[in-house]
Image: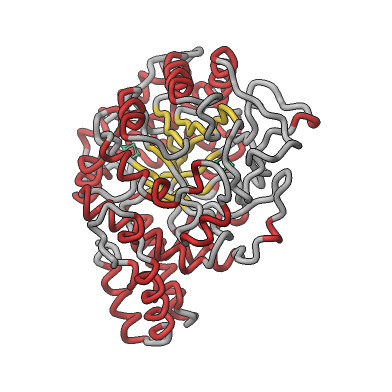
Amino acid sequence: MYNPKSLKAEEFISNEEILDTLKYADENKNNLDLIDKIINKAKERKGLNHREASVLLACENKEKIKEIYALAEQIKKDFYGNRIVMFAPLYLSNYCVNGCVYCPYHAKNKNIARKKLTQEEVAKEVIALQDMGHKRLAIEAGEDPINNPIEYILDCIKTIYSINHKNGAIRRVNVNIAATTVENYKKLKDAGIGTYILFQETYHKESYEKLHPTGPKHNYAYHTEAMDRAMQGGIDDVGLGVLFGLEKYRYEFAGLLMHAEHLEEVYGVGPHTISVPRIRPADDINPDEFTDSINDEIFEKIVACIRISVPYTGMIVSTRENQKTREKVLHLGVSQLSGGSKTSVGGYYEAEPEEENSAQFDVDDTRTLDEIVNWLMKLGYIPSFCTACYREGRTGDRFMSLCKSGQIQNCCNPNALMTLKEYLEDYASEDTKQIGEKLIKEQLETIPNEKVKSIVVDYLKNIHNGERDFRF
Ligand code: SF4
Ligand code: SF4
């Protein structure tokens, strides 16, 4: 029985409700009156439910799809302006006891090198990431109670936050580790993490069990209810995601939105972010074996439909996607990008020797952070290294209410400009610096409040004179 308020996975992600939703979407995919009504509702910027959004995703009318894309782009501009938040993944360990068939870290894979960073190595990686200009990391580790216990993860977080190399600092550590207990989520919260990220992989229970044949991750309910435990442990910024290609994309899309609705219903706050990874080649993994892989066109449609369905939720695209695809989905709603990423354990401080491949997937955008920052600015975006909300305690419902009130606009742009200025001063190439300084000058003129503008001008001078870490 479908019940978004239930704490049981199979009730808030009801298979029956998803199948009914897909049937409803199929029946109405050419119902232009209904589609217009849904688009008009989305224009109010209060989001759409999974049924409404699924009708739009199923719609094949070219004119209507164009309207959906234009609305996604407009909503993106209204909520995020032209800012793009930058981050990098940091792989701590690829020891894993699970058997996920789409991931080279699965326990039976003997081809890859197994590695786990020591605290000294974590420090070296963090210094290398700081030297690139990163301020925000997502740490990643396989599930292995012996090699990667929660104490190890907590030690790594402590090490990461403790390092200030030159003007560098990691100001927000997001955590992507296996589903765990409320007690462990509390420990992560106390360690000062930003978002807790956990991809559902697939919402389809039967497929989920087949794709995760062995290990603790096999337990669908335990995995699906992880965000509830995270919230109960006090983490109020959680990041959802599915791995597109494992199951029918329309099923996953409905499940993803139902998950978001469940969190909103029970905890009063929806997901902080949604990630949209697609299966990539890796050691032991051939994406062609996954018959539900999605093409670029569908990928773009999914991004646009998510953007108009959950306008307040950040959307993340990693370096799994190439430059061309990233450019397209930036227009349609993506608000966070990784840059200069390494998906192996170690690799920032020192390139991994070829025979020691420990990567989780092949990166399709191999540009440096400087190249990505440069490219974004040429496209008219402001790369932002801002972490202000989390550090000012604006998380969970406080973040959402600020977001919904529209006030976030008064903090984000100034914060983006100041963190970009830090980047330009400390890490940028000459060309990037020139483009960036011009951009900051132009953007200053768009700050409507004169008082805020004059404070930003002062702060920018201070940054030029060597001070760091100003924020609204
Ligand atoms: S997806 Fe995660 S849990 Fe599964 S094998 Fe890879 S690292 Fe382990
Ligand atoms: S002020 Fe908050 S919402 Fe705006 S960019 Fe910074 S962290 Fe994000």
Is residue 129 in view from this perspective? yes
Is residue 326 in view from this perspective? no
In the rendered view of the protein, which quadrant contains the C terminus? top left
Percent x, y of residue 288: 71, 60
Percent x, y of residue 101: 63, 50
Question: Is 404 placed left or right of 141 in the picture?
Answer: left
The structure residue drawn at horizontal position 47% and vertical position 35%, both measured from the top left corner, is 177
Question: Is 48 placed left or right of 362 in the picture?
Answer: left
Give 192 or 255, whichever is nearer the viewer: 255
Give 296 or 456, whichever is nearer the viewer: 296
The structure residue drawn at horizontal position 34% and vertical position 51%, both measured from the top left corner, is 313
In the rendered view of the protein, which quadrant contains the N terminus? bottom left
Percent x, y of residue 279: 61, 54
Q: Quadrant of ligand 2?
A: top left
Q: Quadrant of residue 99?
A: top right
The extreme right residue here reads 355
Percent x, y of residue 239: 39, 45
* Total numbered circles: 0
Location of residue 432 with respect to 378 vertically, above or below: above
Question: Is 238 placed left or right of 99 in the picture?
Answer: left
The structure residue drawn at horizontal position 63% and vertical position 41%, both measured from the top left corner, is 106
The structure residue drawn at horizontal position 36% and vertical position 61%, both measured from the top left corner, is 13
Coloring basis for residues? secondary structure
Question: Is 215 placed left or right of 396 in the picture?
Answer: right
Location of residue 130 with respect to 357 vertically, above or below: above
Location of residue 284 with respect to 249 vertically, above or below: above
